[in-house]
Image (spheres, helix red, strand yellow):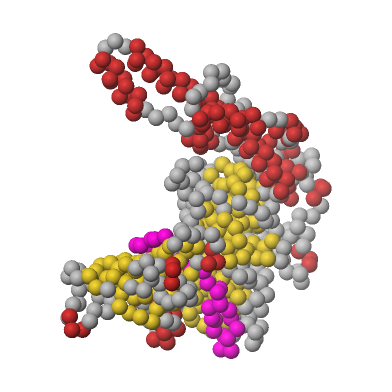
Amino acid sequence: MALFAPHRVLGQVSADVPFSVHKRGIETYATTASGRTFHVFDCKKLTLAMLGPMHENDLSLVCAKRDWTFSACRGRKIYCSRRVHITCELVGHLTEVKHLFAFGTLLVSIDASDCVLVWDISEKTMRRREREYQRYSQECMKKAREERRRLVMERRNERERAKNKKNKNDENASGSNTAKTRVASTKEILNELMRKSPWCLRKFRRLEKAKDIGSFFPGDDENENEEGGEGNEQHRRKRAHIDEDDSNDDDDDDTFKHVRDMDKLDPDAITGRRYEGEDSDSDEDEGEENDSDSDDEDEDEDDDEEGDKDGNENEKHAEDDEEDPMDLAPTIMILPDSFGGSITCIAHPDTYINKVVLGNKRGKLLLLNIVTGRIVKVLGGTADDLGTNDSEITFVQNSPALDVIAVGFSDGRCVLYDINKERAIMTLPHDCKVTCCSFNAQGNQDDNDPLIVVCDVNGTVTTWDLEKRRQRDLNQRAHDSEIISCYFFPGQPLLMTSAKDNSLKQWAYDQSDGSSRLLKFRCGHGKPPNLVSFYADGKRIFASGSDKSLRVWSTIQDQQSKELSQSRVASRAKKLNIHEEELKLPMVSYMSWNELREFSWANIASCHVKENKVYTWRLGTGILGENVLETPHKENDTSECTSCAISQCGSYCFVSYESGAVRR
């Protein structure tokens, strides 16, 4: 491993990626993207529970389901991590993956070209993917070792030929050329092979277009390619969700219900396994001759030792060869031209079996069955339903009420929409673009009125009472920047939000007036840090940023990380209705410390931009010190402090100024 290879990220709680919430047993966890890895937080105490593996680039998407975490790095691959290890990859998109959505045993992925793929992520299928990925990785490792041996031998032969030349000029020229050439490592060659030759299948399962599932019965295989008929006619008809009272129409419309008489239907129509003939392409290349000569490089010896450990893995899973390889391939969805593409969000309405709702930039909604590929409805674009006026849909969120979803628009509207009756129920106006929302069906402890929380790009959290149809609370300073995700915990008056200011916060709705209060939070520097320094034995790191905060990060235990307090800045800013940065000290320009007096008195001194004072801090209690080192008034020196140093005994501090003076 290289000396300066990335190991883990400190100080980044949440990137510009929405978090993903999932439950394991009775505990709830939130997965956030942090640079090239992801963090898993325990929502009960908001503590760091797990660190994910390092990826190739910064994460752009995170989706958690059971023990799996699916992530994307602004590329075409979807990385599958079982707990903290990447075990396989999903490769099938031709452009950058933009959306990931998991529910049940299916994963829906959407790329920049509006290609919708549905993956089977059941436990059995994922374990098989892991075995296939491991086999392919071993094959690529063997090829990488052979390629490195070949490159090393070529380099060695070039050096020998250069030495045998009698012409000194030719020898110097060849020597300079060989000196500039560097043989790639085995890991670099392996990464290149894995990148160019994805291990997974290069085929998709294609569903029959414009076919109704009710038309697939045993014995109709010879008529599958015929167009027209009742199947297409029923597919073009708008399907409405039938209430329990309308029992007479149950046999005519099964759009939102379980498919009845599954044994009477064509299995291919149910599973969606309609694809073209098998391709003769194979991921395995033809064998190459192995170089029997041993190399002098240490890395080659290590590779040989690792190669001896790999063996007989294919014999353990020989039964996989009998299974259909197309089970690992995704199902591609064909979207109608009337929808218009440019997908921006995805959601799953409750009680709608195997169906998702897609929103796009043209203000339209598409209700899609991801198992059969049937287009159920295309909504929006008219004044009768959403009244979108071609505004971009920013989010779609399922509600506790049957058939009702919340749709957010770039013009600040949040519309509660009934997808069964195709009409708007309520419109919640806002001053700016809304980004996300969440529902709470239980309300707070004083009443049981259902609530909806809507967040916008200014960091404001607006709470609406759905029963009384009025605004209940307005938290204008919940975050310092755009809020990207929010989540109401079921059965609790507890809201969790994350924003682009590198923070993760929990809000409790337990006030008598219905307002919220900050319960727990985890945050880092909202703006780039400008000063980083190790403290004492290197287990803690000081960091100061342009957000005027001074923080201590622990490299051993994340719970020990904290921000040094500046005398109740948050409460004073709330009373004065101003931003916290306006009350904080200027940005730190220089800092000195002494661990000997950490628990005795203030042991940290800091110089600040455009300040002629030196402030002290108590690291033991994490607060601002009581002493401020100022220039004597009789000297009339108002120059800025440039640096400071605390003596080894911890009792004195030396300060230098722009005027050239040094004072103790």
Q: How many marks?
A: 0
Looking at the image, is 162 positioned above or below residue 25?
A: above
Residue at left offset 50%, top offset 78%: 462
Which residue is nearer to you in this view: 471 or 184?
184
Q: Quadrant of residue 626?
A: bottom left
- The answer to whether residue 609 of the structure is visible from this angle is no
- The answer to whether residue 575 of the structure is visible from this angle is yes
Residue at left offset 26%, top offset 15%: 168
- Whether the magenta-drawn stretch holds residue 523 is answered as yes
Looking at the image, is 122 positioned above or below residue 172?
A: below
Q: Give the image location of residue 474, x and y in percent.
A: 49, 81
Q: Give the image location of residue 137, x and y in percent.
A: 60, 35
Q: Give the image location of residue 163, x and y in percent.
A: 34, 15
Residue at left offset 59%, top offset 21%: 287
Residue at left offset 56%, top offset 50%: 53
Q: Is residue 287 left or right of residue 180?
A: right
Residue that extends furthest to the bottom in the rendered view of this protein: 512
- Whether the magenta-drawn stretch holds residue 628 is answered as no
Q: Is residue 423 left or right of residue 529?
A: right
Q: Give the image location of residue 122, x and y in percent.
A: 70, 49
Which residue is nearer to you in this view: 185 or 255?
185
Q: Quadrant of residue 140?
A: top right
The quadrant of the image that shows the C terminus is: bottom left
Range of the magenta residues?
506-534
Looking at the image, is 192 positioned above or below residue 660?
A: above
